[in-house]
Amino acid sequence: MADPRLYPSGSAPHRDESTTDGSGRRLYNPYQDLNIPTAYKNLYDLPTSPEFLFQEEALVQRRSWGENLTYYTGVGYLSGAVAGAAVGLREAAHAAERGDTAKIRANRLLNSCGSAGRRVGNRLGVIGLLYAGMESGMVTARDGQDDWINSVVAGLGTGALFRAAQGPRSAAVAGAVGGVLAAAAMAAKQAAKRYAPARLLID
């Protein structure tokens, strides 16, 4: 006999009850003969959506400043490393000579790809770091408003700050380029949200 302390009033399982699916077949329940209350199912009914400590965090539909910083810096460095490795591969191919052995060619290829990948990756990683910091700063300065203005201003500031050591004219040109690129990226993102299928979008 089942322990009455395990079951609230009227919740004890019945031996003659069986669970069936839509086709009438009986479904196997491994807990049927263990005298365990049916509340055990709640242990495995875990939420699939992100859980937040505060309700204000759940209402925010954007990445936090830390996630933003990590995301843009990582994407910038990874993209730069791949692009730099491709540039290094081309340089190694042009520098190859007819009498080189396979060992010398492999060494030149690794050195060229590693050097170019590290150089371009560091530059794009710094650009991503500056952009993420300025965009998060704009969101904080504007009391949480997240729109295209933050991205354009962050692009302007990132370009100008990145080329500030080259002089004011170079900083102004780089800032204009950064603002245009940021505006184009925001326009492409809005167009993708409007016309592309939702399952193809990765925010």
Image (tube, rainbow, N blue to C red):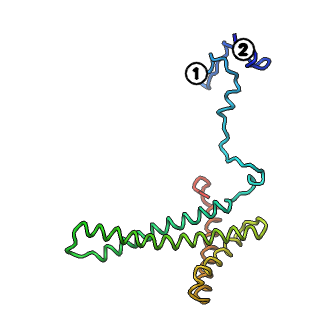
Q: Is residue 177 placed above or below 34 in the rendered structure?
A: below
Q: Name the residue under label 1.
A: 28
For the point 51% across and 67% down, the residue is 77
Residue 158 in the figure: left or right of residue 83: right
Residue 126 lies in what quarter of the image?
A: bottom right
Q: Name the residue under label 2.
A: 3
Residue 100 in the figure: left or right of residue 132: left
Q: What amino acid is found at the position of numbered circle 2 in the picture? A: Asp
Discs 1/2, front: 2
For the point 46% across and 73% down, the residue is 119
Q: Nearer the viewer, residue 86 or 190?
A: 86
Q: Is residue 144 placed above or below 52 in the rendered structure?
A: below
* Quarter of the image with the C terminus in it: bottom right
- What percent of the width, then of the height, locates residue 17? 67, 16
Residue 93 lies in what quarter of the image?
A: bottom left
Sequence order check: which comes first, mark 1 or mark 2? 2
Q: What amino acid is found at the position of numbered circle 1 in the picture? A: Tyr
- What percent of the width, then of the height, locates residue 171? 60, 85
For the point 74% across and 52% down, the residue is 58
Give the structural element (helix, strand or loop) at label 1. Answer: loop
